[in-house]
Image: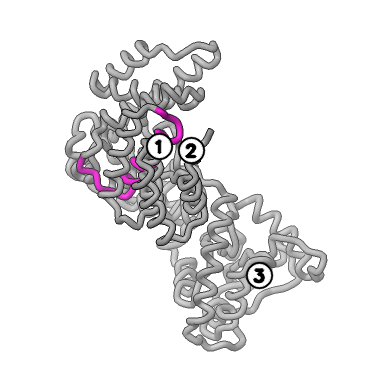
Amino acid sequence: MDLQIEGCLEVDLNDNCLGLSNLKDNFMKKAVCLLVCSLYTFTSIGQNVGRGVDFEVGLSWQEIVDKASSKGKSIFVEIYATWCGPCKVMDKLIYPNDKVGSLVNDKFISVKVQVDTGKLDNGNVKKTYPIARYLESKFNLSGVPTFLFFSPDGKIIHKDEGYKEYTSFVKMVKDALDTTTQIYGLVDRWRSGGLSYWDLPKLVKRVLYELNEEKLASEIASDYLRRMEFVPVDSFVTRDNLFFLRSFNDIHRSSDRMFRVCVQNSDLVDSTLKQSAFAMRFISFVMTKEEINPAFEKARRRHLSPNWNKIRKLIARKCGEEMANYCEIRGKEIWYQNIGDNTNYVKWLVRKITFEGVDNEDSSFNRSIYLNNAAWQVFQKSNDRSQLIEALKWVNKALRIVPVEYGMAIDTKANLLYKLGDSADAIALEEELVEKTKNESYRKTLSKMKLGLETWDE
């Protein structure tokens, strides 16, 4: 069973879940877009196809800017690749559309820019190579198709990406023409102090998903956090606000409002999010970043173990003895996992889950994944019967939170039962799972169980 990563604060509190792999994103975008396009091909609403968008060919970037400036038009650029299925569908269904063409041609000088290269590329395509390299160097192009919009003088004003059907394409173009929705215009307004703090969460999301600019998104989120410093607690501790703020793990410090609120109003934070122990995990995350990780680095340089007493005292000064206890437990779990000491890693993992409480009120899907993943770690790394029994409690809780169709938790439970010697129940569970999912990995596990072989890693 492959472990799944859930919410940032539920996995490793020293992880930064904000950073996303561009390579992973690209593969996901391609897969999703290809699926969407396949569906759209069969469900097209039959938009009128005619002249469509006029794309310029054979022009350099400077020539495009000069032409746009002379005509008083903005610039529309589609970034595409020859292997891009969604791009091809847009060529067939969107750009030939009369209404799309009328909208775009009236306001824009348009050009298609190919980011990959091939032996069959004609001369006009090859002339776009320098444009592609220029745009790649200036903007974070994380996938195709990507759409860039520029003012007549060549200044970027808007960006979006991903397959667009007719309605969403038209909306994107209109957003690019509207100074109140142009993403780069909004960023400029933020930089000049022209945006209200209530506008910032929405801007952060757009910067992340439209511009793919994680550093900029964090800067805006940090500004939002600073502006929220004097907002009353009942306005600060809202579900949307907490969900937003917790998404940016790298910006939080023990000196900021979010940390203080979690220390002083932990029950209010937990009840607002309907996640017991969220405030505790958040505090632990910040303390791990500020106190535990630096201590780990110092210990590694000296080839020693961390000074846990010193760490505990430093944390207790910031958030009290109880939180210091939890942070120490969590820190030891991380330390022993990192150095590959499975015996101590599982020992402190069990203590951490016990400290948090298995049967708390948190019934989120992330919580179920968290408990399942922890149980799987115990199954893989421990032969201690009491620890395996504890892990079985965790996975049973995970299965009470989510439907029984959640295959991984059933697989985890079956494997724990098998390792505890209850082969009959384990095989029955795994057989039912294989029948429902037809999953080959589960089928292999079932075969091992029936042969009496180990199902855990050696």
At which x and y percent is residue 44? 49, 82
Q: Which residue is mark 3?
A: 111
Q: Nearer the viewer, residue 398 or 122?
A: 398
Q: Callout 2: few (<14), some (14-19), or many (20+) C-alpha neighbours within 10 Å? A: some
Question: Which numbered disc, 1 or 3, marks the residue that appears first in the sequence?
Answer: 3
**Left or right side of 292 for 22:** right
Residue 232 to residue 117: above or below: above
Check contact, mark 1 vs mark 2: CB within 8 A: yes
Which amino acid, by three-letter code, is at mark 1? Answer: Lys
Q: Main secondary structure of the magenta part?
A: helix
Q: Which mark is residue 456?
A: 2
Q: Which residues are magenta?
A: 360-383
SS for dot 1: helix
Mark 1 nearby-residue class (10 Å; few <14, some 14–19, many ≥20): many
Of residues 448 and 281, which is closer to you in this image? 448
Residue 117 lies left or right of residue 52; in this view the side is right
- Label located before the other in sequence (1 or 2): 1
Is 367 covered by the magenta stretch? Answer: yes
Left or right, 358 with reference to 8: left
Labelled disc at residue 228 = none
The residue beneath circle 1 is 419
Mark 1 → mark 2, Cα distance in angstroms? 9 Å
Asked whether disc 1 touches disc 3, contact meaning CB atoms under 8 Å apart, the reply is: no
Q: Is residue 34 above or below residue 221?
A: below
Q: CA distance from mark 1 to mark 3?
A: 62 Å
Q: Quadrant of residue 14?
A: top left
* Label 1 vs label 2, nearer the camera: 1
Which corner quadrant of the image does residue 142 belong to? bottom right
